[in-house]
Structures are given as structure tokens and as C-alpha cells.
Amino acid sequence: MSKEKYAGKMERPPKLEQPNIFPLDWKASTKKMEEIWDSSQKEYWDPKKLPWDTFDPNSYSWEEREAIAYWWQLLAVFDASAPPVFAEAVIKCYEVHEEDPVRRCFFSVMRDEQNHEQVCGMFIKALLDHDDPMNYEPKTEIGKKAKKNAEWLWFNGGRYWNGYKTAVPKYSLAVLFSSFLMGEIASSTLFHQMAAGATEPVFKEAFKNIGRDEGRHMAICMALMERDYPKLKVDDRTLITKQIKAGYYFLSGVLFEPPPEFWDLNPDFIDNHREIQDFASKAGFFIPDYETKKQNWKNAMLNLKGVLDKFDIPFPAIPEVGITGMEINDVDMDDIIPVF
Ligand SMILES: [Fe+2]
Ligand SMILES: [Fe+2]
């Protein structure tokens, strides 16, 4: 900041260099965002108020506890990275002087994701009776496999932070969050299915709330696209197509199965991953099977494709789930902006 004094030299202060950190206006032109903000206020929930008194981890064997905790660790790799990811997005909203309801909507996503992170932590803590799963000593063979897999997931998920931080100032919000929609569509479907299949009230309630939050995040993204996509620059269109492909790779980690293009994993990862999830499912912790996840994922992408078609933005080919489109081979993982 310049220490130069201006007040004696001019009647009005000089123009602030942009971007400055905050606007001093409360303009609002996207009515939809205001409505979403209102529902985020109404639907806010407290993880501590889930029906915890109905949940007794001791009613499960240690294998079952470690297998179910694994699934929450998998989710935590995404949901625990979301608060800082969206905190950056909130800062960006202020720097670019986004309208007031958009600032609030991104703030609500950050707050929701912080809740999701809390829930992951609360379940992991209750199930493992330990607050630090990376330094937890597994009690069973399943637990050992789970810990190794979780270590690899965490390592991978943690790698994109520097890339994200450099990408945020470079791109507009509409480009940054283009792959976000796909994740939100698929995750709200996944969580609704998991809520429907859950036998424990505490899991059911948590998934219901998380699924509802993700549905709202999806609506925020749609509103942003509808506002900004009609005036998109040509370069941004290509970038969005790439972002979608990168988002597919990243989010497959939790919504489908982690593909090797982004995920650098131990050779026995997938076998262990399936075995642990089967174990959790058999213990009553419902996880949709491979085919259902694949179908969810495909539907989410077809939905997003429908949106992008409206704005003449090419969709990438995703042969893994049978979607044809533009061939994208040069996805630069340094530029990846994965969000959940
Ligand atoms: Fe989330
Ligand atoms: Fe979300």
C-alpha cells in the first residue's frame, strides 16, 4: 500500500486500484441467487443435532467400523478440501466485486462444506474412536487396507492446492466452477440414494441434509452459468470443455472409481476399495454398487451436457461412461479446479 498522502491535494480520494478486496455496494441483479440464499438460511443444520443418541458404534465389529470409517475418509478427502477451496472463491467474489447475493451464495457453500467436513470427522471419530485417522493403528486386516488406501487418497487430493491457488486469479467464476455443477448433480443423487438405503437414523439424516445442500450448490452453479455463459469469450469455451474433463477425472474418485489419469494410487487400491465398500455395505451402510454409480455419473454428465449445449460449449468425450464429444487429451492437472 502506498503511504502517499492525498487528502490535502484533492477534494475526492483517488480511484482505488483494482482488484481491491471489497466492494462497498450491495447491488443485486440475479434474483435466483437471492432465493437460493434464503433457502440456505432456512435449511441450515447443525451436525451436533443429528440423532447421535441412536448411534452405538459398539454394535458393529471392528472390521465393520473400520470399513464404514473408510467411506467417510474417502468423502473427507473431498469435503475437507472444500472449505478452503470455497474460502478462496468467497475472496474472489469480493475482489471482483460480485453482486451481493452471489457473495452470500458462495459464502453459504463454504459454510455448508464446513458442515460436511465436520460430519465426516464426527463419524470417523466415533467409528475409530480416534481423531486422527492418518495416525490411527488399524485393528483388523480390512482396517489396514483401508488406512493404506486412505493415505493414497489424501496424498492425491492434497496435490492440487497450489494449482488451484494459481488458477483462481486467472479465470472467471463461471469458468472456475464449470465442473462444479457436474459434481453437485452426481453427489446430490449419490447422497439421496445413500439416505434412502441407510438403516441408521444418524446416517440417514446426515445424507439427507448433505444431499439437500449439494442440490442447492447445484442451483447456485446453474444460476451463475445462466447469467454468464451467454457472454462467454471463445477462449473460455475451450477452457470449460477442458475443465469438465478434469472434473470428471477428479470427482470420479468419490462419485465413481478413481481413474489413473489423475489418481496416482497403489496397485491394489481398486481391489481393496471394492472389498472395503462391500464390507461396509454388508454391515448395513448402504453404498450404491458399481453399475448404479456409473449410471449416476453418466446422468450427471448428460445433464451438464444439456446445459452446455444450450450455450454452444462443446462437451468432452468421456468414453469411460459412453459419452461421445470433443477429444480432450491435454488436460493439464496443474490447472485443475476440482470442487465438491
Ligand atoms: Fe459437500
Ligand atoms: Fe457442495
Image (cartoon, rainbow, N blue to C red):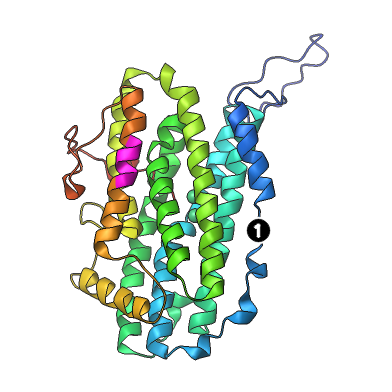
Which of 95 and 318 lies nearest the eye of the viewer?
318
SS category of the residue bearing label 1: loop
User: Is ligand 1 closer than 8 angstroms to the Cβ of mark 1?
Assistant: no
Residue 85 placement, left or right of 138? right
Q: Is residue 1 above or below residue 290?
A: above
Rendered residue at 27%/53% (across/down): 295
Q: Residue at x 30, y 88 (%)?
A: 141
Q: Please indicate whether residue 115 sits to the left or right of residue 59 in the image.
A: right
* In the image, residue 301 lies in the stretch drawn in magenta: yes
Q: Is residue 61 magenta?
A: no
Left or right: residue 14 compared with residue 258: right
Q: Quadrant of residue 291?
A: bottom left
Circle 1 residue = 45
Q: Nearer the viewer, residue 201 or 167?
A: 201
Q: Main secondary structure of the magenta part?
A: helix
Q: Is residue 322 visible?
A: yes
Q: Is residue 3 above or below residue 197?
A: above
Span of residues in magenta: 299-304
Residue ID at (26%, 28%): 314
Residue 235 percent location from the top left of the image? 32, 22
Residue 130 percent across, percent down from the top left: 52, 82
The x, y position of residue 313, in whole percent, is 30, 25
Residue 199 horizontal/vertical position (percent): 48, 75
| Residue ID at (42%, 75%) | 285
